[in-house]
Image (cartoon, helix red, strand yellow):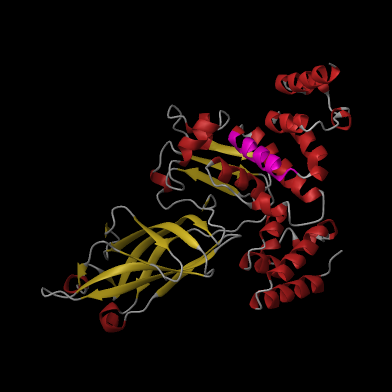
Amino acid sequence: MIAASQFYYCRRLIRVAEKLKLRTVSRYIERQMIEYEDDWDYSMYHVGFRDASFLKAAIKYDLNHFLFLSNVSIAIFQNGICRFENFPECLNNTTEIELGHTETPYIAVNWFLGLERVSDPEGDRIRAYIKNVCEHETARITFQVLIKFLKSNNFGISLDGPWSRGKYTKGITDKVFSTHTMKISEIVNPFEWLDNGALEIEYGIHLEAYHKSDEIWNFNFHEKSFNWANVEFSKVIIKLGTIKGTELYCDKANSIESFQLLKFHSQFMSPKFSEDDSILSNRVLSLNNNFRTQSTETALQIAHGARDRLLEEALNFTNSMDYPTIICCNIVEIAEKLKLRNVSRFIERQMIEFDAEEYHKRFLKLAIRYDLNHYLAHILRMNKPMKDVYEDEDVQLMSRNTIMLIMSKFMKDSF
């Protein structure tokens, strides 16, 4: 069993390694944690994993292999009302108010709301903005924001009707301004816009997609968009039966035309988007605890066109024969259950491109089980022995394509 002191030691080593830019050291420590996973004290470290020191280090330093096997994903939805106290007195010295933190296994963003004074011959005006500060230098994000000035009676006007989009690029702390400005002389009216001298602004922030140095965009399925309640027939909640009860949100506002892609690729999920059924509860897809959070999300990312390099990295990451096979099996199994055949085909192509002889037997079993006939044909063309593969498989459960390919190979070799 790995003791708490060892977790603490690993975290410190990784922190020093990252400061010295010794990525190989961080990966080595990460590999040790994966290899000793069976010895973890789950009662101490898994149920309350979000508070573990090593988990925080894994998120901060992008130890994605550990996060994949740890079934971890964290995100915080930002939506609320921000108050600028004593607004008339702070007009010449406005400050930014920190709104919160959005965090996933791959990226972390701090959000701020501020005011900017704009000179105008007819009277100075003011506009609001939302700023993001990303903790990763190579990160790119795209997000939506809502900015609404509230009157003292809690009604307000939306300045961006209904939202604005923003992007974060390298070396730039991005601000998304309200598209309209308001006269300061109107705002300082204590009976209309100010609540006990404070200016209130309603805001909404939704991180849509992100990527780091690999330049692979990933959709954010862990947050409801702030416009979630207004999206009628284009949203599905995938509820995972994990300890944390993780939910993945798929809707048009969350990822552009997300629901159209799922309707097209998955006959299993398409009925959930039916316009004939207006009951939202019927569009909640509950999955059992066999659906690991990260594996399910990876399958959804691939289904939406994100060409994840996690498999490519994993196949060269460890000497363990099990790790690449676990990744392929987990994702393909989930894809087949959700009837996302395009995901299975993507994994199949990765298996063919990797083409390492030591994985042929394991991958071939996977191909037979899930009718990955392209990989099966690839192996047959290489004249690899198959008796060790199909002898423990139930031939009656093989697909027609699999049986035809195997019989064709046997008949060809017989002449």
* In the image, residue 364 above or below residue 114: above
Q: Position of residue 38 (x, y in %)?
A: 84, 56
| Chain part drawn in magenta | 342-355
Task: Place residue 203 in its image quadrant.
Answer: bottom left
User: Does residue 254 appear anywhere in the picture?
Assistant: yes
Q: In which quarter of the image is residue 67?
A: bottom right
Residue 351 highlighted magenta (yes or no): yes
Residue drawn 73% across the image and 55% down it: 316
Coordinates of residue 31 in the picture (x, y in percent): 77, 62
Q: What secondary structure prevails in the magenta region?
A: helix
On the question of residue 369 being in view, the answer is no
What residue do we see at 58% from left, 43% from top?
A: 302
Please name the residue shown 81% across and 17% down the image.
411
Quadrant of residue 165 in the image? bottom left
Locate residue 33 relative to residue 119 in the image: left or right. Answer: right
Q: Is residue 154 magenta?
A: no
Instruction: Write the residue at 66% across / 47% down.
Output: 295
Give the percent coordinates (x, y) of residue 369. 76, 30
Asked whether 147 or 198 is in front, the reply is: 147
Up-down relation of residue 215 to residue 392 (above or below): below
Which of the image's four quarters has the N terminus? bottom right
Closer-to-camera residue (405/196): 405
The C terminus: image quadrant: top right
**Furthest-front residue in this view:** 415
| Name of the residue lying farthest toward the left | 122
Q: Is residue 374 left or right of residue 77?
A: right
Q: Name the side, left or right, on which 72 lies relative to 219.
A: right
